[in-house]
Image (cartoon, rainbow, N blue to C red):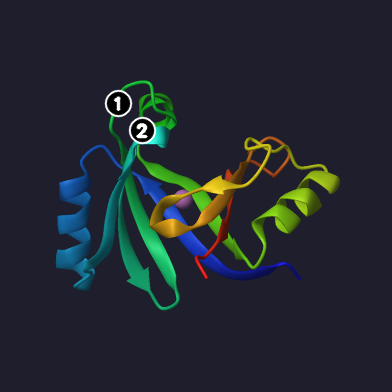
Amino acid sequence: MLLTQIDHVAIAVHDLEAAIDYHARAFGAEVCHREVVEQDGVEEAMVRVGESYLQLTTGTRTDSPISQFLVKRGEGIHHVGYRVDDCAEALAAIVAAGGRAIDEAPRPGSRGTTVAFVHPRGSFGTLIELVEEPR
Ligand code: CO
């Protein structure tokens, strides 16, 4: 079994501050990490839940995938991060099983992680992010 944890569930939101405030009021949730990933055009706020995270995410420019998702689909679950020990190994395995790689090779993600996205088409309608935590 190559998956070790659910790394994170990513929720696309229009207003990151409002989403952070809502989770704070509802659950006492505190943001443990915040980052703008210029390459992907996203800003994210991570809330730790056990050994996993809730990732509240929004677009930083109109042409980013998250912004386009928000326009097309509205707010909601955007992708699920599957934690793996070896991103390259997991990517090769999912492609061998018929999955469609969005990233041809693992690349840097937020928090110093190594990630690769796999297209929802071919993965039962779910955008999957393979996440290898920093060592
Ligand atoms: Co993610």
Please tell me whether residue 101 is drawn above or below residue 7 in the rendered image.
above
Residue sitting nearer the eye, 11 or 47 = 47
Residue 52 rendering spot, x and y as whole percentages: 45, 70
Left or right of residue 64: residue 86: right
Residue sitting nearer the eye, 33 or 126 = 33
- Where disc 1 sits, the SS reads loop
Left or right of residue 95: residue 76: left
Q: Which residue corresponds to mark 1?
A: 61
* Residue pictured at 69% horizontal, 38% vertical: 101
Left or right of residue 99: residue 87: left
Please tell me whether residue 21 is drawn above or below residue 39 in the rendered image.
below
* Residue pictured at 25% horizontal, 37% vertical: 14
Amino acid carrying label 1: it is: Arg
* Viewport quadrant of the N terminus: bottom right
Residue sitting nearer the eye, 34 or 57 = 34
* The CB of the residue at mark 2 lies under 8 Å from ligand 1: no
Q: Residue furthest front?
A: 135
Please tell me whether residue 4 is drawn above or below residue 91 in the rendered image.
below
Q: Which residue corresponds to mark 2?
A: 41
Location of residue 89 by image quarter: bottom right
- Where disc 2 sits, the SS reads loop
Q: Are marks 2 and 1 in contact (CB under 8 Å)?
A: yes
Q: Residue furthest top?
A: 63
* Residue pictured at 38% horizontal, 21% vertical: 63
Q: Badge 2: how crowded within 10 Å, few (<14), some, or many (20+)? A: some
Check residue 69 in the rendering and tell me which mark sits there, or answer none.
none
